[in-house]
Image (cartoon, rainbow, N blue to C red):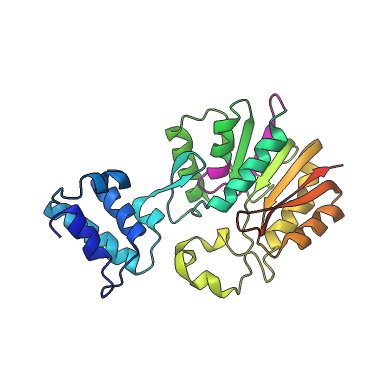
Amino acid sequence: MKDIAAALACATQPKDNLIDRVDAEWLLAYVLNKSRSWLYAFAETPLTEAQQHHYLQLLERRGKGEPVAYLTGTQGFWSLALKVTPATLIPRPETELLVSLALANLNDMQHPFLLDMGTGSGAIALAIASELPSAKITAVDMSSAALAVAAENTMALGCKNIELLQSDWFSALAGRRFNGIVSNPPYIEAGDVHLQQGDLRFEPMSALASGIDGLEAIRRIVAEAPDHLLPQGWLMIEHGWQQGEAVRALMANAGFTSIATHRDLEQRERVSFGRLA
């Protein structure tokens, strides 16, 4: 594989069955520090031995299942390029629905106070901060390693309105109240077979699984949220596509009103929200 075209052809040969074409392109673009479109424009560009060796290493690791985001250390989310590591969940397009909902509910407030629970890489907090610079955002996570990644992303993007705190959900937030609380908590059933498949095998289990029915973290968040919301404050939670009814019931029992669920692009129930009465 002396040039770009040959390298991509080699990586996607059916007999090798290494990875698909898109992944191969992302990895080669990463090795060359170029865009995917550049690869097509300069397909005859020769590769150095070092570049070929690096690329082959990445192909081998991807062939064993390692996520492309962890191999390159970056993932696009909203309009941002974020650093990610195996200490953080990989931000996914479905979660952008949660960002959109938060922006819609908070946009008419001059200086909203927002809490992002289980921030991981900081994706949700940073996306909202990029659109609402007047917001004051507190982002918490139990993992110090994840918070370190969030801090790097916050600094790299120049966000001045995000406070990062280590907290087991609300444990470090006694007496504090917010106009809105957003969260993409773990919501997969602990015994779900999908946890041992695909990219999920490499992501932090604490950010994925939550008890026998997947609702352990959501129950705690919903139950404690009223003590940390200002009057008419919003609670917005991402959840599994089969959990909408259960989450709506939890919110109703906790005293929330205006409860509803938004569907993702595949028309699956994905984000439920309610307002403190």
In the rendered view, tell whether residue 45 sits above or below residue 188. Answer: above
Q: Which residues are magenta?
A: 109-124
In the shown orientation, is residue 164 left or right of residue 157?
Answer: right
Evaluate whether residue 141 shows in this view: no
Q: Position of residue 192 (x, y in %)?
A: 59, 73
- Magenta stretch holds residue 117: yes
Q: Position of residue 85 (x, y in %)?
A: 42, 52
How many numbered dots are placed on residues in this image? 0
The image quarter containing residue 209 is bottom right
195 or 13, which lies in front? 13
Evaluate whether residue 149 shows in this view: yes
Which residue is at 75% across, 37% downward?
A: 175
In the shown orientation, is residue 166 left or right of residue 33?
Answer: right
Quadrant of image for the N terminus: bottom left
Which residue is at 62% across, 52% downward?
A: 184
The image quarter containing residue 126 is top right
178 or 99, which lies in front? 99
Which residue is at 68% across, 25% downward?
A: 111
In the rendered view, tell whether residue 218 sits above or below residue 194. Answer: above
- Magenta stretch holds residue 76: no
